[in-house]
Amino acid sequence: MSNLECPYCLTPQTFHRGDKCEAEGCGKKVPRQYIELARTKPPIWIVTYGPSQHGKSTLLGSGTFLMERLGIIVPRAFHTYLDEFTSDRIAEIQKGQHKGQGNIGATLLHDTPEPLIIVLKNFPKPKETQLFVIFDLAGEVVDKIVNRVSEDGSRAPVYARAVTKAKTVWFIVSLNDLQKDMIATGTSINRLFFTYTQAMEHLNVPIRDRDILVTYTKADELMSKGAGEEEGLTMPPLIEEYLRDDPYSETGNRKADRPPALDVDDYITQLERVSEELRFFTQDEVTGGSAFVAMAEDSEVNLYFTINSAQGGPSEAGGAMGTEIRRFRVLDPILWTITLSQGSSAAAGTALILPTHGSGKSYSMGLPLALHDALRLYNVHATTYFAGEVREAFGMGMAPVEIVPPERRLALIGPILDRLPRESIVVVLSDEALPLDIDDFADTAWDERLLLFGTDIRVMNARIRWKYQVQSTREVEQITRDFLRQVIP
Amino acid sequence: MTSQTVPLVVDERSGFPLLVSPEGAYQVGLLPLTWIQLEYFLSHTSDRRFDALWYQDLLARSARASVATVNATTWAQLFVRGLTLHETRLVGGWWGRERWLLPTEPMWQAIRSWAHSLPAIPALGEALRRVGANPRAIRLIEAVEASTRGKQTEVPSTLAEQMLLDNGVRELVLLNEASGAVGGIGLPHRSLASLASKPLILLSDGNLTRHTEVGFRLFLKA
């Protein structure tokens, strides 16, 4: 039995009775391809978070334009939109972009925004498949989210839960517009971070080790200005050169030369270099930037930076003028997100072992799912087992929900551990009864890689190193983080 | 005593070492069946008889030691003792119904004589690593060697000593195929001294009764 989240309401479930979401209030038909793909590899959740009119939808329009033509730069790569909403919405955004009418594609504020569900096959490398669930959130979310999640008694809107779900959140910011906002309203880049952290806090989700991909849009507005033009932020020469040299800026345009094939490893190296340069630029030049970086670092959030110009500049927008759009570095956020979603090889073969008795406190406290989520936060996609049963209970990365423990099994972990790869990580959950063979692993190589949680004080009797008694799901995240930092270089 | 080397192989089910008998007809457990091996069986079987209650009952009669804490007085608790004959057949059958066999007394004695004629395997842990044995098996075997050694003079000199065929635990053997009579064979270690009076005891109603001093050793057809 494997579990996955409904892409529309984010509720984990098995889908073993069909493709209709069984969550109360949802009931949507989930694409079969989504279910099949998500069962083999967890989806990549993306949330676009940023003020109105800063270019979120425009970036998505240009990004999807390029996705539709990936086969030009990566042999045999292709895309699929998995539902009608995705196809229609992307067509709408792209139409608005071509007509130079950005508002046509603007995202409206809903409590239950629909995601774009997109599959990329053979990308960025042959035989690799990426399943994206993208929530393109309305700009107003930034203003509303804190109040909405603070409301007593009501369930957080889907957009807020999507923000918590995504390991990597795209902070989409037009620097020129941000400077204007600063003058008009005093708003700086800090506000984005503030509202994000507040929302996460209200929803009781730790932000440590989350990834924020700061995506600077409308880069054309920051390019070197000619004599007589107004003074403002000016991009570092290295970044300007990087933007102008995008080999894929005209991909798919009529009469454009065929671009070189994508060397993804080389490209990622460039992304890292550019990210570092933009970090310095943010600290030194962007209003509120140094505080933003410091706050993020203090919160132990991972910051990455990218920059693009989704339609080359205002004069080029609009097919009516006869000029085709050039899209500079719109591939970068996608490639960053794929890179950040990939787990550490050190975490390959991670196992989460659950108690065999369903009456235990750990189940009533919701610890299995909390542990699964805590691991996933660090790109560790565990396979779940029940103690005493070598058969997988939930496949790799699948959320352990609708759990039916095998009551008659013994609390044994050895037969499971002995089948795992050498460098595996194991997280064991126990209640009153400790695993019968837990002490067999004391003073072995497992001692560094085995984390034992117990709801009972007797867990402290185990002879292994990493053992904790837990009283709440919140403790689980912090302990797991400390443990993973030790075992994953 | 000859200097021939003994072929070591690894049991595919549990990764514990087996020795290939002289004519190559059998593979014999280097040691009597351990709790770790039994737990492999328990984690795979769908036979609902072997549940947590059954295990607790067995544990109550013959304790289980952990490799991490085993010492000169508790090492025998690494080996499973007290299975009924019926249970032994079910457990052994997991290694292959056509492969597993309950050794007869002559068969067991033949292995003992053969093992007495051979020197102990030097640097056993290393040898086991070379054949890819389960690390838990290696650790257990090294712990047994360390625990049973006591004084330096007690370093095993023969393969039989290394296999705990003497000074180990009694092992289940078939005494009479026609009647199905079974016995417990072997001289137990002095930690089980109260039971060490005879080298072979007849087990009454072995099919259903737990004889907590008797374990068994895997004998598999090659």
Image (spheres, coloured by chain):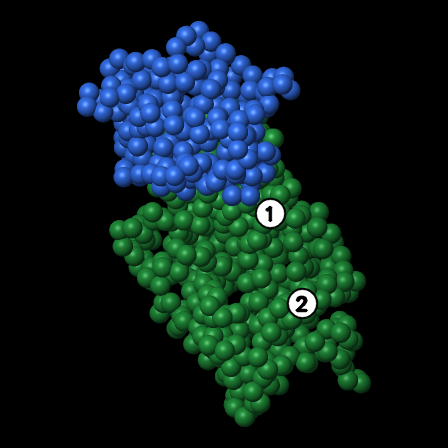
The one of A288 and B24 positioned closer to us in this rendering: B24
Q: Is residue A434 visible?
A: no
Q: Pointer 2: what residue?
A: A269
Q: Amino acid at mark 1?
A: Ile
In which quadrant of the rendered view does residue A240 lie? bottom right
| Residue shown at the point (49%, 44%) measured from the top left | A420
Q: Callout 2 environment at 10 Å: few (<14), some (14 to 19), or many (20+)? A: few
Chain ID, mark 1 = A
Q: In the structure shown, which secondary structural element does the residue marked by tag 1 occupy?
A: loop
Q: Quadrant of the C terminus of chain B?
A: top left
> Seen from this angle, which residue lies furthest left?
B178
Query: Of residues B54 and A431, which is closer to you in this image?
Result: B54
As drawn, B16 above or below A173: above
Give how far across and how far down residue A257 sits, in percent.
58, 89
Q: Residue at x 27, y 55 (%)?
A: A18
Is residue A239 in view from this perspective?
yes
Which chain did the renderer colour blue? B
Asked which quadrant contains residue B204, the reply is: top left
* Most foreground residue, A346 or B205: B205
- Which chain does green denote in the image? A
Query: Residue A369, image x and y in percent?
Result: 45, 41
Pick the front one: A7 or A444: A444
How dense is the environment of label 1, judged by Cα within 10 Å: few (below 14), some, or many (20 and up)?
A: many
Secondary structure under badge 2?
A: helix
Position of A290 with respect to A477 (left or right) is right
User: Left or right of B90: which side holds A388?
Assistant: right
Relative placement, left or right, of A93 versus A262 is left
Chain letter of the residue beneath label 2 in the structure image:
A
What percent of the width, then of the height, locates residue A42?
A: 45, 55
